[in-house]
Image (tube, rainbow, N blue to C red):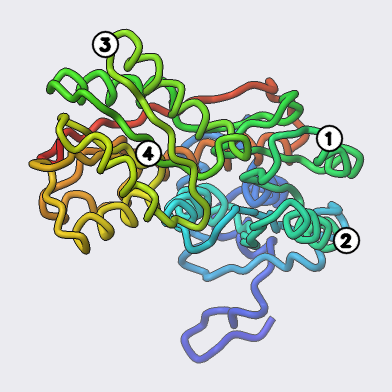
């Protein structure tokens, strides 16, 4: 094989045999590493292969390997809204697992059940090795075609009923319960929960239920305002009704939290003097707001890593338990309540 003037192999000519020789391991060991099969591989071997592959800038020929293994080394990640701050942090966590394995991520958006189905069918036509899905529908029958395709699937953030795929979420109910308890102990007499339609996502219902349960225990009324497209103008009616009481607003996701903050500022309504404000997710802007916002902060990177690890296990042909894995969230109590 020809070498360049420095004696190194041209990048395009590196083969799996070259990597194996440089690392002092067998070709089969390199293949197992590239395909994420670490079951009988020492940490020392893994570290050596990672270093050798990086130093050689070795790029696997996925087209050739796909013909042999029937794998494309690509996975699909389908989220409900790419403009939502949830998506990039989730994908970054997923990439932390897939990138070292040479697995590419195809990211797509499914804003409606119909659009989501089209996107999923397109991914199936590209023979992706697996799919991570933030489901638009709460109904398992809408995803029967994924079961029929016999492709590894993991759900993230939202459940479907019945649960036919394993799912990774935050501990939504528990974390919101802790937040609600801490906020209402400050003496609030009225609560408004602003959320997108509850019926479309299980976690929205869980977050609202947590506020309701804590409110009932502490004898504090909890009102629900369901909105579309993050339009929060209707909260004016509630503010007028509770103007003589100590009131707090909970926004059920980061987009709604930002929209509510902007609306209150635009109408010169002071926080927390006139009304308290808290929410779920702030994607690092909450600590910069004035006042700083009280939030439930999901560990999106850990959620992404966990769902990716479970998907890679399925792709490798191993079974996992179909259940919900909950990643603990943090509570940031700040000056907005």
**What residue would you read off at disc 4?**
299
Element marked by disc 3: loop
**What residue would you read off at disc 3?**
218
Badge nearest the viewer, 4 or 3: 3
**What residue would you read off at disc 1?**
141
Q: Position of residue 260 (x, y in %)?
A: 31, 52
**What residue would you read off at disc 2?**
67
Please give the name of the residue rendered at 65% of the width and 80% of the height, measured from the top-left corner: 12
Nearest the camera: 117 or 264? 264
Is tag 4's residue or tag 1's residue first in the polypeptide sequence?
Answer: 1
Residues under labels 4 and 3: Cα distance? 29 Å
Can you say which quadrant of the picture contains the N terminus?
bottom right
Can you say which quadrant of the picture contains the C terminus?
top left
Residue 48: in sight, yes or no?
no
Nearest the camera: 306 or 98? 306
From the viewer's perspective, is residue 320 above or below residue 291?
Answer: above
């Amino acid at each position: 094989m020809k070498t360049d003037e420095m004696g190194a192999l041209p990048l395009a000519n590196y083969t799996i045999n070259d990597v194996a020789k440089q690392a002092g391991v067998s070709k089969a060991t390199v293949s197992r590493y590239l395909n994420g099969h670490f079951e009988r591989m020492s940490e020392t071997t893994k570290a050596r292969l990672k270093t050798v592959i990086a130093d050689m800038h070795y790029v696997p020929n996925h087209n050739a390997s796909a013909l042999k293994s029937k794998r494309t080394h690509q996975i699909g990640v389908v989220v409900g809204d790419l403009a939502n701050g949830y998506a990039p942090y989730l994908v970054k966590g997923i990439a932390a697992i897939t990138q070292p394995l040479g697995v590419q991520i195809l990211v797509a958006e499914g804003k409606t059940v119909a659009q989501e189905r089209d996107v999923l069918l397109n991914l199936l036509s590209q023979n992706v090795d697996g799919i991570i899905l933030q489901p638009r529908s709460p109904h398992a029958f809408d995803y029967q075609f994924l079961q029929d395709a016999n492709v590894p699937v993991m759900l993230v953030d939202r459940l479907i009923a019945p649960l036919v795929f394993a799912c990774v979420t935050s501990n939504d109910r528990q974390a919101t319960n802790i937040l609600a308890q801490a906020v209402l102990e400050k003496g609030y007499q009225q609560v408004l929960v602003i959320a997108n339609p509850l019926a479309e996502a299980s976690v929205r219902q869980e977050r609202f239920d947590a506020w309701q349960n804590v409110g009932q225990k502490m004898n504090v009324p909890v009102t629900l305002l369901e909105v579309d497209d993050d339009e929060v103008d209707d909260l004016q009616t509630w503010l007028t009704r509770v103007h003589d009481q100590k009131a707090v607003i909970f926004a059920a996701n980061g987009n709604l939290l930002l929209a509510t903050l902007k609306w209150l500022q635009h109408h010169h309504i002071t926080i927390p003097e006139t009304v308290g404000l808290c929410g779920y997710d702030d994607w690092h802007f909450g600590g910069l707001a004035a006042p700083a916002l009280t939030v439930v902060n999901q560990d999106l990177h850990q959620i992404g890593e966990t769902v990716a690890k479970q998907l890679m296990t399925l792709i490798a042909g191993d079974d996992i338990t179909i259940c919900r894995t909950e990643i603990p969230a943090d509570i940031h109590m700040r000056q907005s309540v």
